[in-house]
Image (cartoon, coloured by chain):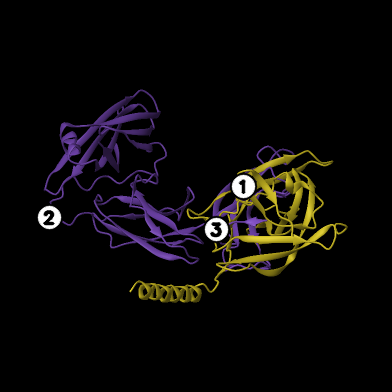
Chain colours: A yellow, B purple
Amino acid sequence: MRLRVSIAALAAGLAVAATGSAQASPVALVPDLRESVPSLVTGYKDTSGAQTQFELIFASGLENVGAGPLDVRGSRPDTSQPDMSVMQYVHNSSGPDTPYPVSGKMQYVTGGGHNHWHYLGIEHYELRRTSDYSLVDGDHKTGFCLGDSERVLNNPDPQHYNWLSNTTASRTRRPRSASRWESTAAGATYTTR
Amino acid sequence: MGVDRGWRDIYDPLKEGQYVYVTGVPAGDYYLVMGVNQDQSLQENDYSDNTSSAFVRLSWPNGTSNTPAVSVLRTCAGYDTCPLPAAQTGDATSVTPTAATLDGTVNPNGDGTSYEFDYGASALYGTSTARQPLAAGGSSVPVSAAIGDLVPNVTYHYRVAAFVDGGVYDGGDRTFTTPPLPPGNTLPNSPLSPPKAQDPAFYVRSVHSLSRGRVALRLTLPQAGEALLRATWHGLGASSTTVGSGRRAARRRGTVTVYVRPTRAGLALLRSRSRLAASLRVTFKPSGGKARALSLRVTLRR
């Protein structure tokens, strides 16, 4: 009798396992990027250069309201190359991440409060006339260091990667690849690939 | 590097590159437009929300060699243009001695907005319809509101007004005149004198409804004399009730403040309701001259 129960339990377990594997076909967790509305728009007199410039300064925000993280990773053949080519990795509900080539590049930026790798051109700013939509001025941004500044949804990913670009490790020029910064209780760790 | 699901990457105004140049740019209206992944090189499940914008008004209050001033009149999430809402006051229809329907159009020009109609016996209005929401869109939408409790034979000013981000965009002032009551009608104390808005020497500068049933009027008077006020509430019965009154003597021409104080009947009515709309007749009797009068609507608050 006990043997018969064990066999039945084993059969049930196999059935559950088979059902589980059928349900585990991976789902692509694609991000959805959303541009925040401009904020803190202020007139500014910039006397730092040789010629005084008047500017509109502002805050901007890049939001991810999709199903998965935005994960971009840079690499270069050797450290003599100044820039890195970029791949986007779309996470899946199970299994390995799916890589997609991206036309952008990463560049090491110094000055202006920066001393780390930037992903170029992910955001753009423009000032246009309301009368004919003609361009007055474009952006002067050298790149974006990408990180998690604040929550925008009430239910962020429970496995929060906590991307932080302004870490001590990010300030090195030397790596052959720039990946994600996984923040731990002990601090940031840099993952080379 | 990246941005996790449910998080935002913020770049504050003092970070590198968070600016556009406006040196030599004339004062005026501009769109500040921002976009992410506009070349769609990154994989996403929705590219329609990648652009946002703001309507900004640039000015040089201290000359073009000093810091410009900028005000943001509207922000538009998901749009690369951010026009202001447009309102147009239309006709007043179905006008009776005590009621009318006010028409107009409102174009939200983007995100949803709200609107109301303002009306009163002068271009200061003083009474507004309940504010109504209007869904997002890019074309003019007909709007209307039925108003009542009007005074017969009075010229009313009215307008439609749209609201966005704290700004008011009105559709322009128009007027209509309620007809007199037909003979035999029992509504008392009518017609009241029409407002003398065209009289530059005698008019109401402002109306403030205070607590405990008081109303403060700023009146401009052409010469020495006495201003008399009487607020009347037209109830459902055949007779009217004086709910407030006041008077003020002026020794010379100029602006005076006159208070309407509630009568015992007014206080009794206010006990049963938080506010009371009443007709106010303002009579100015100059020293040794002929009295002139105008009328308007006021609200007494508990």
Q: Position of residue B134 (x, y in %)?
A: 41, 60
Which chain does the numbered disc 1 sit on? A
Q: Quadrant of residue B48?
A: bottom right
Residue B280, x across and y down, in percent: 26, 40
Which marked residue is nearer to the observer: mark 2 or mark 1?
1
Residue B96 visible = yes
**Mark 2 vs 1: CB contact within 8 A:** no
Which residue matches tag 2? Answer: B184
Cα separation between marks 2 and 1: 87 Å
Q: Is residue A156 above or below residue B216?
A: below
Whichever of callouts 2 and 3 sits on the residue coming sooner in the sequence is: 3
Alpha-carbon distance for marks 1 and 3? 34 Å
What is the crowding at mark 1: few (fewer than 14 residues within 10 Å), some, or many (at least 20)?
Answer: few
Q: Nearer the viewer, residue B129 or B113?
A: B113
Return the x and y of residue A111 as percentages of the image width and height: 79, 44
Using the image, name the chain to which the residue with label 2 belongs: B
Q: Are marks 1 and 3 on the same chain?
A: no
Of labels 2 and 3, the one closer to you: 3
Q: Quadrant of the N terminus of chain A?
A: bottom left
**A100 displayed left or right of B241:** right
Q: Looking at this rendering, what residue extends furthest in the right direction?
A: A80
Q: Secondary structure at mark 3?
A: strand
Disc number for residue A184: 1
Residue that numbered label 3 is attached to: B77
Q: Looking at the picture, which amino acid does disc 2 mark? A: Gly
Q: Nearer the viewer, residue B178 or B54?
A: B54
Residue at figure coordinates x 58%, y 54% from the top left: A36
In-image side of B147 versus B110 (left or right): left
